Image (tube, grey):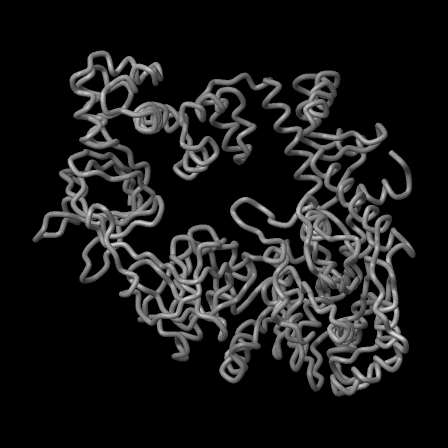
Amino acid sequence: MEEFEMQFTLDKVIYQKNDFKIVRVKSTTKEVRPYLNTVWGNVSIKGEMPIIKPSVKYSCIVKKIEENGAYGYTLTVSSVYPMGFGADDIKTDSDLISFVEVFVGEGTADKLRKTKGILKMVQEGDITGITNIKGIGEKTAQKLFAIYQKEAIGSKYLIKIKQLGFSDNEIKALRKMYNDNLYMAWEGINHNIFALGFRLDRMDKIFLEGLEGDPTDKRRLGAYISKSLKDYMYNGYRSYIPLVEFYNLDIMRNIESRVGIDELKKCVKDLEKKEELKIIDNKYITTFSEWQLENNVKFIIENLIEKQDVEMLPIEDIDKEIDEQEEVIGFKLNEGQRKAVKDIIMSDKCLNMLTGYAGTGKTSVTKVILNIYTKYNRGEFKLCALSGRASSILGESSGYPQFANTIHRTLGFGEGGWKFTKDNKFTVTDVLVIDEISMIDFYLLYSILAPVSPNMKVILLGDSGQLPSLSFGKTIETLELFGDSINRNELTQIMRQREDAFISKVANDVRQNINPFENTKYGWYGSDVEVCIGDSYQYMLKDFIEKYKKDKNSTIIVTTTKAKTDMLNFDIQNKLIQEGLVNDKSPYIIKPSSTKGKVYKMYIDDNVMVLKNNHTSKRFNGETLNKYKTEDEYGNVVYNITTEPMPIFNGEIYTIKNVYSEGYVLLTDDKNDIIVDIESLECCLAYASNCHKLQGSSANNVYIYHTSEWVDTQMMLSAQWLYTAYTRAKKLLSIHTDQYSNISKGVRKNAVDEKVTILELLMNKAI
């Protein structure tokens, strides 16, 4: 359908949550007439809206029309604003009184009626003049000024901004950026549209067409220079690049051809002065933020090493302590594990790194260490990992689930950022364990180490053979640069699986850049590993469903990218519907997928993965929402969920337990029921996932799928990717690819070697 403008007046508010509302409205717009309720003459609309008042006429853009059976039609709208109350519409005192009646209140309007010149006072911000009016205090006056700026003046600049070509989502972001002051937003756009942080191609089009800007404007050139550098760095997550290489980029040559090399270099220097770029030794270039971050990482590690003051446990015989713990855990530690326990327990170093192959028992070593600390009344721990699933596994396997959280939860992440920082240290913590450190980028490494006190014992767990972070930094390799200042142990003997298990053999070969399937180009089958070369997609889906029926919570497909994950999830969901395992007639939620033009419908019993941290979710203890039903000041029904807060985080997987018509969804992880309003929940289906999302977790049945036709497959596949994917499997590893060469090429490629860090330069040369 084509979008169209609609005018309406309020009939009834059905639901509201912050700026999102569902309301019934009256409208005479001809395009709406076919969708009006034939009895009541109204229609439901939903979307982001300001406060909707009775007797005020509003304008909006209708984006979508949905039919909801017995509930009639619902229109999705945007750009909702009141008509007749813009700054250009308010020309007299009488106009202002009408405005105040609607947006402030009739009581305040009555107090202003007998005073002349109130419009001028409000326009000029004359607080003394307004407060001299009987019954008007400073608080009311400030409220009046603020609402006039937001609603009256804001409407004027809203129209101006929309005329430039800004989308509804961009305007929403602008409102948030400038605290709803659209005049300041307008000024910001004109000052430097490229500094707003929106997509450069979008802002460039508005700059050239809407603002009629000069193509050689230094602000424009500077934006393209900064973006070129960031794009090139992010393409391989290289923290810096040689200057010569940078100036040879196509876009830099294009700029040079327009303005000349001298002007180009001058723009670069100007960006360095503004602390947007940083030139190192006249040889390399990076972003100033990355330069600053890696310097901070170096400082915080060196500071912990210099000031470390770890109190030793009063242990007389460490071997005897380990013997006792072997009785507790029910198995003997191997030689490498025993040495690691000794080294970490008896070390006076703050930073201790324990690395090892997947399945070598890093968490078993950690469990013994924590048990010994507990025995000596030093049992205050923090255990953390990047994802919720990984932290849960760490907590359960170490025996201390009550201390396990995501890194974000450990740092007390909230609306204001981190609770714990370099200026607000962790308190009463004896041991901090950080799992899957290869996955942690430099930003998170700095964030989690900054609040560490020098008297804490920090244990960093990881596997150098697994994937590096999806951002800048090589955490394990960086920590190794500090040499003996950091206590290091490595485990090599596989304990998770039998020594003769094929999964272990296959994974360890890949880790060493050896192709385990060298002589099996047409497929290979073992007791717990199968390789299918060719068109095996449908076979894989069929086999996946059979395994899923028996082991719902431990069967998953691993693929290369989010877009391919979407495709697999969509196909699997359809198969599950056909098998009767998911009811497509049940209530559902709708979310957009990464595939353009498609959406997910997620039904009750679907598995979903959270894609964005959500701090508004609550632990839910009721079966219905009725007990939370209340009325707002206008008599409209609202639902105030006041149960215990329970934030959910990116990467966590839940099952949809219920979907409520009131706009909420109930999730479960078999431990907790969590209620979230649908609009704030960012999620996708979770039958398939990319490898990075699953790092730190495992499943009984793991299917690997990648094909040569995907360009991104060729970019993503590496020995680290394959090793990480293969080691997610505990009982079955099923590998599916169209060409054998995909495996052989991936085995030979090392993702970590492609990354470079500024910190490597800093450690080898004082700059």
Q: Say if 175 sits above or below 576 in the image.
A: above
Left/right placement of residue 370 relative to residue 154 reads: right
Residue 517 visible somewhere in the drawing:
no
Q: Say if 163 sits above or below 407 in the image.
A: above
**In this orientation, which residue lies closer to the viewer: 48 or 688?**
48
Query: Which quadrant of the structure image shows residue 519?
Result: bottom right
Residue at 81% x, 62% y: name it.
353
Q: Say if 612 sits above or below 502 in the image.
A: above
Residue at 21% x, 53% y: name it.
73
**Looking at the picture, how far across and down is residue 415, in whole percent?**
51, 46
Q: Tell me how many marks there are.
A: 0
| Rendered-image quadrant of the C terminus | top right
Q: Residue furthest left?
A: 39
**Looking at the picture, how far across and down is residue 604, in whole percent?**
38, 70
| Rendered-image quadrant of the N terminus | top left
**Looking at the picture, how far across and down is residue 405, in whole percent?**
61, 63
**In this orientation, which residue lies closer to the viewer: 453 or 178?**
453
Left/right placement of residue 254 relative to residue 248 reads: left
**Looking at the picture, how far across and down is residue 285, in whole percent?**
77, 33
Query: Which quadrant of the structure image shows residue 161?
Result: top left
Residue 565 visible somewhere in the drawing:
yes
Residue at 37% x, 29% y: name it.
162
